[in-house]
Structure formats: C-alpha cells, structure tokens
Image (cartoon, rainbow, N blue to C red):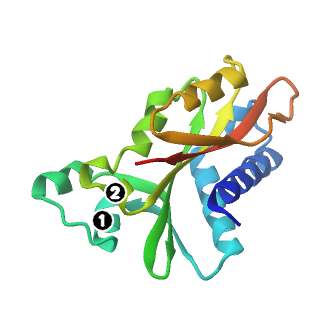
Amino acid sequence: MEITEAILSCGIKAVKRYTEMARPQHDNGVPECFISSLIASQLYDSDPEQVVKLERQYVDLASDLDIAMTPEERQAVLQLRADIVIYQGGRPRYLIEVKKFDEGCPVQWIDGDLHKGDQIGLNARIDVYAGVMVCETNVPLDARKRQLEQLERCHWTFSPSIEFIDHNWFWCFACGKRSA
C-alpha cells in the first residue's frame, strides 16, 4: 500500500477504534498518542518486514541517517521527537508527525512539526509526513482543510468526511507530504 493511503486508512481506523472504546463526547476527544500508537501498529501489521518506532528522538534519527551535526545543531534538535518513524532495509524511510487539528491546535503547530528537522537537513534524507485528524468543532471542516492546504511546501490528501457518533460534527483524516 502506498504510504499516503496507508496513513489515511490507519488514521481513520485509529479514530474509529477510540470512539468505539471510549465513546467520547466530542470527536476531538481522541488523544493524539492513541492515534499515533494505532497507526504505528497497523503500519507494522501491513508489512512486518519494516521496523516502526514511536517517539524517535531526532538526534538518534540523525545518527541513523548519517547526518553530521554541529554542537549547535545537536542542541537545537536534542529535545525533538518524531511521532512515528518507519525503517525499511535498516534505514529510516518515512517520518510521520501526528496531530489533532482543532481549536487547541493552531495550523502553525502542524507546519512547525513538518519543519522540525530543517535545521539538520532532515527532509533531504527522509520523507516527512503529517497525519492529521481534522475536527470540525466550531470551525467548519472545509475551512480547516483550506487552512492546511495553505501551508507552503506541503501537499495534502483528505479522506472523505465522516460523521461523528453524536451526528453533530464531521471529521476527516488528512495526510500531508512535505516537499523540499
């Protein structure tokens, strides 16, 4: 399965699973950590030959990619972590940052996650993606999608709109690929 389709499919399954289990009052009640964990697990299940890691530190990822860092660059990324990293053939291939896009998450935070590794040239060595649960809540779903589409150097693919269990809200899952 192509990675964009896999992120979308796994993201939808993760959100639906949580809503089945926890029956949250609102769609944005799904924790990002749950979405990340289930996406990682499902991506691994789709291809057990790959290695899938959660919360991979950027300094370790840089080492895995043979990126030489100055002390300043190392300090700049020391506390940064990638939500999901997929390794193929022993090398990091895909980095996926997971977000829940609602009132508590400005679009700039999603953009920031897509650019966390810019200081060390990470995007030149690994494909960087965002997997985003887009929540309608107080802002219409189409308006939130347009906000994502306005982010520079990123191409977005969206799932169809999905009605939340209480039938008052809609959500979708989005996959954004960072371009150079």
- 153 sits to left or right of 135: left
Q: Residue at x 40, y 48 (%)?
A: 180
Q: Is residue 60 left or right of residue 26?
A: left
- Mark 1 nearby-residue class (10 Å; few <14, some 14–19, many ≥20): many
Mark 2–mark 1 CB contact (< 8 Å): yes
Q: Look at the numbered disc 1 and give the secondary structure of its residue.
A: helix
Dot 1 corresponds to which residue?
62
Q: Residue furthest left?
A: 71
Estimate the x, y position of residue 120 in percent, counting from the top left. 25, 55
Is 25 situated above or below 153? Answer: above
Q: Residue at x 50, y 28 (%)?
A: 107
- Across and down, in percent, residue 15 comes to 73, 47
Image coordinates for residue 156, horizontal then vertical, percent = 61, 41
**Kind of residue at disc 1:** Ala
Regarding mark 2 in the picture, which secondary structure is present there? helix
Q: Counting residues from the N terminus, which is met first, the one under dot 2 or under dot 1?
A: 1
| Mark 2, residue position | 122
